[in-house]
Image (spheres, rainbow, N blue to C red):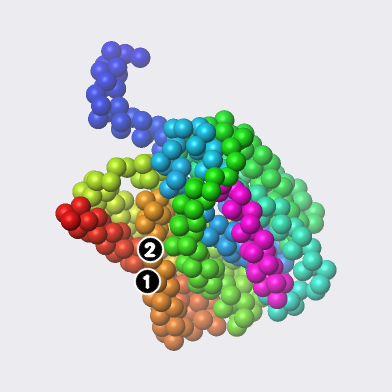
Amino acid sequence: MSNFSQRILANPKYSKLFEWGKLISITGSAQMIVQATALVTGILIIRLLPTKEYAFYTLANTMLGTMTVLADGGIGAGVMAQGGKVWANKEKLGQVLSTGLDLRKRFAILSLAFALPVLIYLLWHQHANWLIIVMVVLTIIPSFLSALSDSLLEIVPKLHQAIKPLQFNQVSVGVFRLFLSSISIFIFPFTFIALLANGIPRIYGNLKLRKIAFNLADKNQKPDPEVRREILKSVKKIMPGSIYYCVSGQITIWLVSFFGSTDAIAKLGALGRFSMLLTVFTVIFSTLITPRFARFPNDRTFLFKKFVMIQIGMVSLCTLICAAVYFFPQPAIWLLGNKFQGLEVELSISIIGACLSLMSGIFFGLLSSRGWPTHPAILIPGNIAFVIAGALLFNVKTLQGALWFNVFINSFPVIMHSLYFYYKLSRKQHESAA
């Protein structure tokens, strides 16, 4: 390294900028690979599965997300908040992780008891025979079991900012999923084969993730009653919102499932594939920004500046994404294949809704990392009011109507999470003054 480079890096400002550039480049490049493999895998599934089978696949994936949210119920936010306090202590961090995993197993039973009957009914309502229903239910289980611990195990390397092994594991899982999907669905174009090809790589990645996490946290620690009480405080705040999210977050798919056709479900699922590309930004934030936000000191002015910076950055980013899709939709539509031509307008609307959902998730994650999740007594009634108003304003029986409905209801949590953060900061100021 030259003397000039050494002098630059010796400057604290440039050194910090260099560190952030390195972390973002590692995380960003890894996530580009992960999302690229996910997109290619998704396009293969869209093109190779018959329309009816892809509709079943969309329903199964939607319910998998619901099951995962219910099984968490705020446990992940609680583990992040408690882990952020003791992240440098291997034994105490092991206690937090062990307690979170124990709670997650208990919640999983309730999640399965609710979600599987609903999935069975939706598949039956779309005229799936009982053999297909049984195979779909059986093959969704591996992905669900892996998801139970994935998000909790990832918290440990995120808090330590051990980015490289975490990203390498995600890339390995993505490449493995692409390989398995390409060779299996090409020969057997069935929903349950696509689900199994998704689940097996996740199990492999989960085993690797355990090794990464337990290098930084003591795996021999037992669940701690005091930590359990603290995590359950987060659960009590977040669980009502999680239950409601399971309805409102997937309500567009559910409405189309009840009132629309199998073809409309397949189109909605296909458009959603491009929205999944935004996951790269969610992962970058949850990996680099949210853990650091959890570790920030309780300085009102400092937190205010950081949150405003994040808001401005997110609005600018989402505006660029929406503009790019609006002016250049043809490449994305071409990738979907002949079955989904003519959906340029629908794609633009879908991306707007996805960007709002992205901002909502990131703002809520920042709030939760400080132990300030938006109170469900505020969030749920407001969401219900928006759902009712949206159902009256838009024709949810049509694809465009359902997509505009999605945009409308996703705008509320973005506004609410932002206002609630500023409210919590103002409360802190009054408490400090008192």
Residue 41 on image: x %, y %? 64, 51
Residue 405 in the image, given as x and y percentages of width and height: 45, 76
Residue drawn at x 33%, y 30% as measured from the top left: 18
Quarter holding residue 160: top left
The residue at the far left in this view is 433
> Which residue is at the far bottom?
392
Residue that numbered label 2 is attached to: 374
Left-right relation of 90 to 206: left
Q: What residue type is disc 2 on?
A: Thr
**Image quadrant of residue 134?**
bottom right
Q: Is residue 163 left or right of residue 295?
A: right
Give the residue drawn at x 44%, y 32%: 88
User: Dot 2, crowdedness within 10 Å: few (<14), some or many (≥20)?
Assistant: many
Position of the N terminus, as image quadrant, is top left
Q: Regarding mark 2 in the picture, which secondary structure is present there?
A: loop
Residue type at the position of mark 1: Ile
Q: Quadrant of the C terminus?
A: bottom left
Residue 369 visible in image: yes
Magenta segment main secondary structure:
helix
Range of residues picked out in magenta: 99-121
In space, the residues marked 2 and 1 are separated at their CA atoms by: 7 Å
What residue is shown at x 62% (from left), y 81% (from top)? 258
Instruction: Report the residue at 36% width, 41% height from top.
Output: 295
For mark 1, does the 10 Å Cα neighbourhood hold few (<14), some (14 to 19), or many (20 or more) residues?
A: few
Would you say the residues marked 2 and 1 are in contact, meaning their CB atoms lie under 8 Å apart? yes
Residue bearing the label numbered 1: 378
Q: Is residue 310 left or right of residue 113?
A: left
Q: Is residue 113 within the magenta segment?
A: yes
